[in-house]
Image (cartoon, rainbow, N blue to C red):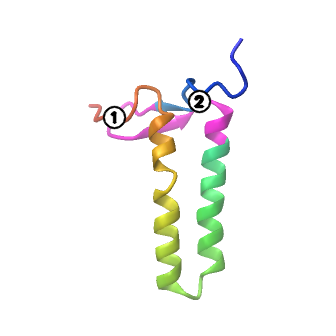
């Protein structure tokens, strides 16, 4: 039986083509993806009138969790054709 927070289990499938992570394959991946999307949408909505600030915050928030996505992708990130 897999432990609820098994640190070795992947959260995302590898992309079939291209580079990066595919869709989540574990609830932790779905939770991370939904929280990440909610954060990006929330920042865009909160700072709608301040375009430069909003773009900066959204860019940083978009990049910060990338190491988690990469570490938790089955097979890691590499170019697939």
Q: Which residue is mark 1?
A: 17
Q: Which residues are drawn in magenta? A: 14-30
Residue located at (29% from left, 31% from top): 80
Relative horizontal placement of residue 72, taking residue 38 as reference (left or right): left
Q: Residue at x 46, y 27 (%)?
A: 74
Q: How far apart are the two marked residues, 1 and 2, measured between alpha carbons?
A: 17 Å
Q: Any mark on residue 61, and which?
A: none
Name the quarter where the C terminus is drawn: top left
Q: Quadrant of the N terminus?
A: top right
The residue sitting at 57% across, 32% down in the picture is: 11
Please state if 53 lies on the left or on the right of 34 as rendered.
left
Q: Residue 33 placed where, x, y %?
A: 60, 47
Characterize the local packing of mark 2: few (<14), some (14-19) or many (20 or more) Cα atoms within 10 angstroms: some
Position of residue 64 measured from the top left corner of the image (x, y, whole percent): 49, 56
Percent across and percent down for residue 25 are 59, 30
Q: How many marks?
A: 2
**Residue tagged 2:** 25
The image shows residue 57 at horizontal and vertical percentages of: 52, 72
Instruction: Determine whether 7 is above or below 47 in the image.
Output: above
């Amino acid at each position: 039986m897999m432990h609820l927070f098994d640190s070795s289990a992947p959260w995302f499938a590898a992309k079939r083509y291209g580079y990066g992570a595919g869709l989540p394959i574990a609830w932790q991946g779905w939770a991370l993806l939904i929280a990440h999307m909610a954060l990006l949408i929330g920042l865009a909505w909160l700072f709608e009138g301040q375009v430069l600030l909003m773009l900066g915050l959204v860019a940083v928030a978009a990049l910060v969790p990338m190491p988690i996505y990469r570490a938790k992708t089955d097979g890691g990130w590499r170019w697939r054709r």
